Amino acid sequence: MKRKLTLEEGMSILQEGISKAMLILDGYPTGSLFTCEEYMKLYDCVYHMCVQQPPYEYCAELYEIFKKALEESITSRVMPALKDKSQITLLYEVWNMWTKYKVMSKFLGGFFLYLDRHFTEDRNTASLNELSICCFRDLVFSELYPKILEAAISLINQDREDNSDCRDLLKNVSTLLIEIGSGKMHYYDNFETAILASTANYYNRLFPQWLLYYPPIDIFMKAQNCLNQEKDRASQFLHQTSVEKLLQVVHEQLLGQTALDQAKLYEKQKTECGDCSIQYQEVLSGCAGLNLGEGSSRV
């Protein structure tokens, strides 16, 4: 019969494994950290501490040990790596740390896997995977989410200006916002809302400049080109429903009622100056239904 493990004895065995697992966040490959025998020793330690008879059954204590290990990995590795980062460097690093954190937490969760079978279901508490996501969300996103959102919007605007090679990174950000929600779309939905507002502001500022310098036919060509570019760009990192909403916003600002109102104001000002040669609103009214592209509900 196997000798009973006390909490202190089990903790001394697990601590070495936990410390090694955290090295994943420093870039160490998982294959170089543990042999199969070492990994099974850690799993067996947790297993026996779970199935021992009271007062030597330590499921609740092991769950807290797992949680504290996750929290320590974030405070000692993840947050220092993100400190003082901003804009594109923040986006790169938060995705990098999230990717390594997922590997580490899955690896670490392998030691504690028996808890999911013997404890979390019985207690109706968060699974080990859910807990790992929750810790990252609470400790990282609670502080950095506004900066992540601001950096992503800035990157999208930069891409509009110079077609920067950043869409894979934006796709990663979009994926992160979905994964961190644990099945809820709160973070992604806020991202979508911020993109739509920023897009409306961008084209609301751009359209009056077009009125000053381009004839109607050039404006319509530029508007169609913008719609095509926005569709191509957004399709690479947003859900299809978000792409459709974005195209509707661009259409409204360049060819819809908002554009028509700006054109009326511009023509009024030109008329007051004695220039009645250009009738933007007539052409805008005729082109208000310009195709938004395949996949859009508006034609």
Image (cartoon, rainbow, N blue to C red):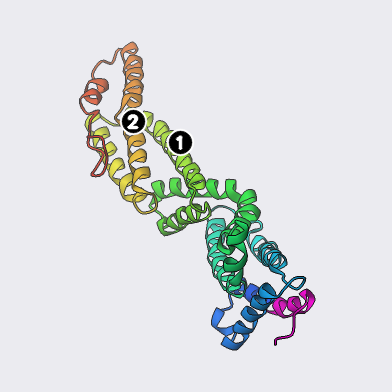
Q: Is the residue marked by circle 2 packed among few (<14), some (14-19), or many (20+) residues within 10 Å?
A: some
Given the image, on which type of amino acid does mark 1 rest?
Ala
On the rendered image, what quadrant is the N terminus found in? bottom right
Could you say whether the residue bearing mark 2 is in a helix, strand or loop? helix
Is there a contact, CB below 8 Å, between mark 2 and mark 1?
A: no
The residue depicted at 74 percent of the width and 85 percent of the height is 3
Decide which of 13, 225 is in the foreground and name it: 13
- Tell me the quarter of the picture where residue 222 sits: top left
Q: Is residue 6 left or right of residue 282?
A: right
Identify the image quadrant of residue 292: top left
- Is 277 left, or right, of 244 in this rendering? left
Instruction: Write the residue at 42% across / 32% down.
Output: 205
Q: Which residues are magenta?
A: 1-17
Is residue 172 among the parts visible in the rendering?
Answer: yes
Q: Between residues 153 and 277, which one lies in front from this camera angle?
A: 153
* Position above or below: 69 against 138: below
Using the rendered image of the protein, determine whether residue 20 is visible from the camera's viewpoint: no
Q: Which residue is mark 2?
A: 252
Residue wearing tag 1: 197
Point out the tag, 2 or 1, that comes first from the N-terminus: 1
Q: Residue flagged by tag 2: what amino acid is it?
A: Glu
> Is residue 10 toward the left or the right of residue 129 in the image?
right
Left or right: 212 as drawn, with respect to 28: left
Q: Main secondary structure of the magenta part?
A: helix
Magenta includes 272? Answer: no
Whole-percent x, y for residue 233 in the image = 35, 50
Magenta stretch encompasses residue 4: yes
Secondary structure under the numbered disc 1 in the rendered image: helix
